[in-house]
Amino acid sequence: MKLFDVYSLFDVAPERASGCRVWDSEGTEYLDLYGGHAVISIGHSHPAYVAALTEQVQKIGFYSNSVRSPLQEQLAWRLGEISGYPDYSLFLDNSGAESNENAAKLASFHTGKDRIVAFRKSFHGRTSGAVALTDNPSIVSPFNSHHKVSFCNLGDLEEVEKVLTGGDVAAVITEGIQGCGGINIPPEGFLQGLSLLCRKYGSVLILDEVQSGYGRTGKFFAHQWDGIRPDIITMGKGIANGFPCGGILISPAFRAVKGMLGTTFGGNHLAMAAALAVLEVIEKEGLIDNALKVGNFLMENMPRHSSISDVRGRGLMIGIEFNTEVSPVRLRLLKEEHIFTGVSGKRMIRLLPPLCLGIPEAERFISSFKKVLGS
């Protein structure tokens, strides 16, 4: 049997990792400025994280959601306290895509409506409903195309309101910052306006913080820069530092009905141990403030070059936009400078490093980046 060949792979096989560094099977060290798609939040193999998982697996690794879980209750309390949403409820699942599916389903239950408004250049996941909410025709199969979704331009409140006047919109979903679409920050005042429109027309506002949440932008959630409180907030990626986990925060206005949502593996004991360790490290090590500090340093010291058309982002969620294709630059950073980076489309390098990235590592990247650009 062979693997189903759907990934474009670099010829690197990571074998171990620590903090912001990764070593391959040959012992070569790499600087990780991508964190496996923003998944590694507190750093690879953090001692507190390893200890928490090791201790938990020696006790109990899994039981179903048919029994009470004190670990889930503890996570809900800690997450509410640290995120600034102590009055919201938490539903746990396995990934960001599943979180977005559950958010859309819950909004439809709550409103009795069946249409979702999403935005062009959005990305909400690869499961059926999440794909339908994603503006990327290449990953939408005929099966995914039957959902009622209207796409608007990010920042265009008039266009959104025209759709909302139809009266059938259950929810509007938007990312805190569009990640895969190009590190697109919502224009000033847009999220506030979106919140007001949702209230006016009886629709639910869903903030997808799967990539932009968990301290990455210098706030716990990116939307907190705009001072709004969405009805539902979706999470994934960095929530458990690599252990599969996702969840949604739900406004007190929603009524829970037995059986309306469910999951087999979501909220399992190991995931909860991992997620609790992540919150502990984020708080104790000041990683949210660090993300803002080091992110600002990177933005301020990014080299200026004729091939770079823009640098944008917040905290440690940064896009470097080129006027040419970036694959040769990314490949040279990996092969010659031993630095992992990501991309958004063909013309943007995307940086999503662990939140423990320090100034020395940032300086190393800037020096290597200048070297690659100069040659």
Image (tube, rainbow, N blue to C red):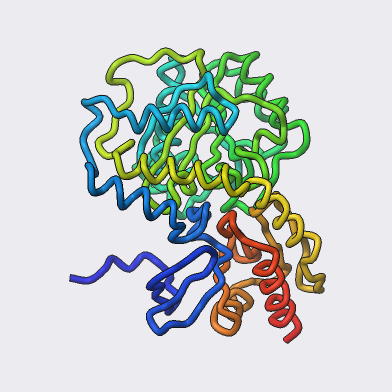
Quadrant in which residue 350 is drawn: bottom right
Q: Please state which of residues 336 and 120 is positioned toward the viewer in this rendering.
A: 336
Q: Residue furthest left?
A: 1
Residue 271 in percent (x, y) is at 35, 43
Q: Residue at x 60, y 28 (%)?
A: 84
Left or right: where 334 falls relative to 248: right
Q: Residue at x 58, y 65 (%)?
A: 33
Q: Residue furthest bottom?
A: 375
Figure check: 149 above or below 287: above
In the rendered view of the protein, which quadrant contains the N terminus?
bottom left
Q: Residue at x 42, y 77 (%)?
A: 24
Q: Please state which of residues 255 and 7 is positioned toward the viewer in this rendering.
A: 255
Q: Residue at x 33, y 14 (%)?
A: 257
In the rendered view of the protein, which quadrant contains the C terminus?
bottom right
Quadrant in which residue 334 is drawn: bottom right
Figure check: 232 above or below 112: below
Counting every numbered tag in the picture gives: 0
Figure check: 336 above or below 364: below
Residue 249 in percent (x, y) is at 49, 28
Residue 142 in percent (x, y) is at 37, 45
Residue 148 in percent (x, y) is at 46, 30
Q: Please state which of residues 198 and 145 is positioned toward the viewer in this rendering.
A: 198
Figure check: 48 above or below 256: below
Left or right: where 304 falls relative to 179: right
Left or right: where 95 falls relative to 338: left
